[in-house]
Amino acid sequence: MNTDVQNVARLSSLVRPHILKMSPYKSARSEYTGTKGIFLDANENSFGSVIDGSFNRYPDPLQLEVKKRLAHLKGVEVEQIFLGNGSDEAIDLLFRGFCEPARDVILTCPPTYGMYKVSADLNQIFIWEEPLSADFQLDADRVIARLTDQVKLIFICSPNNPSGNSLDPIAIETIIKAAPGLVVIDEAYIDFAPEKTKLSWLKQYPNLVVLQTFSKAWGLANLRLGAAYAHPFVIEILNKIKPPYNVNGLTQQMACEALDQVEKQEQMVAQMLEGRRWLEQALPELEGIQEVFPSDANFLLVRMKAAERVYGLLLAEEIILRNRSQVQLCEDCLRITVGRPEENH
Ligand SMILES: *Cc1c(COP(=O)(O)O)cnc(C)c1O
């Protein structure tokens, strides 16, 4: 086991050098963090807001109240949590913190979530792809065979979008052990899966980043809140480069309310799982359905005859599915989100 000094030295070597050196923006609210007093430091409107409600003060840049609740719920330290404007912001900041444009590489295992590639393209980072198998599983040996020091980030989405299945934890762990760079496990759908979160692995693996989101099981997609869990040094880098007030105060307040109602989230997850089971039974009865892939998420990937045509016909009925039929390994497939019972029927 490495000492933490060794871990930090290793992680420092992965950060883009100019980011290690730069000093971040110091916002008024990060210089003075007290809550009492007369605040004349941030050029806010001291009279209040134009609309009902108090929105005139800048929010907590480090979202401590949300993080305290999350730390308690997830069994991690506050220092291991980054919060972003959706997990998409965390993905983008990982690129900006760790990947040198026109030089560094990320590795993904398609078919998978589209934002990894979009962020890579936006940040001018090379992308190497090592496809999943035909049954959407991870081949650790093939991934590891491609690793070099240039590969700064490996994205593993489990349960995977759009296939819905959980990826083999042993393969994931083998990759984390072998990776010179960071391994990002995207757990956007973990609350729907029997497979456990890999948050407990953070203790062993300083190069692990786990992403979760409030957009799916918590039903808060509109608020834009995502979390990255990682070694405190990685979190410090993300905090250093994020926009100062990246998560607005209303979102922080609503997230605290949600986190005080974990049972409600569990109830809703149970309802969605029931809906998924219903769809898993009902769909194969329909004509033209070839395969309903096993899912640990709140959606199903379904292979069918004439997927493109079915997609168009349903669209005309104002039923909107996700057309994945042009995606590698998802030929003739549509992705169906589990809806309310009346929507599923
Ligand atoms: C929906 C989803 C997200 C969530 O992104 P947010 O920006 O937090 O809304 C992240 N990863 C995957 C794989 C997803 O499907």
Image (cartoon, rainbow, N blue to C red):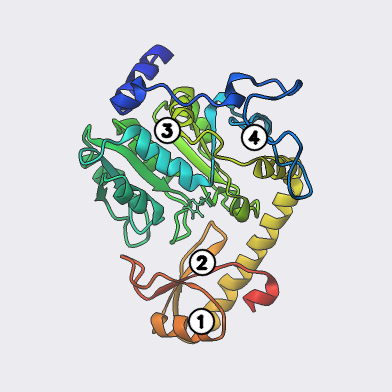
Residue at the disc numbered 4: 58
Nearest the viewer among 201 and 211 is 211
Q: Residues within 10 Å of mark 4 (few under 14, many from 20)?
A: some
Name the kind of residue labelled 3 in the image: Leu
Q: Which label's residue is closer to the chain start, 3 or 1? A: 3
Q: CA distance from mark 4 to mark 2?
A: 41 Å
Q: Quadrant of residue 151?
A: top left
Name the kind of residue labelled 4 in the image: Tyr
Nearest the viewer among 147 and 29 is 29
Residue 147 percent coordinates (x, y): 23, 38
Residue at the disc numbered 2: 300
User: Which residue is drawn at the image coordinates 29% and 55% (left, top)?
Assistant: 131
Quick check: 150 above or below 300? Answer: above
Q: Find out if the beta carbon at label 3 lies less than 8 Å from the nearest ligand 1 atom.
A: no
Residue 212 percent coordinates (x, y): 54, 44
Please tell me whether mark 4 or mark 1 is closer to you in this view. 4
**Is label 1 in a helix, a strand or a loop?**
helix
**Is label 4 in a helix, a strand or a loop?**
loop
Q: CA distance from mark 4 to mark 1?
A: 42 Å
Name the kind of residue labelled 2 in the image: Leu
Name the kind of residue labelled 1 in the image: Leu
The disc label shown at residue 315, or none:
1
Q: Which label's residue is closer to the chain start, 4 or 1? A: 4
**Is label 3 in a helix, a strand or a loop?**
strand
**Is label 2 in a helix, a strand or a loop?**
strand
Residue at the disc numbered 3: 208
Please tell me whether mark 3 or mark 4 is closer to you in this view. 4
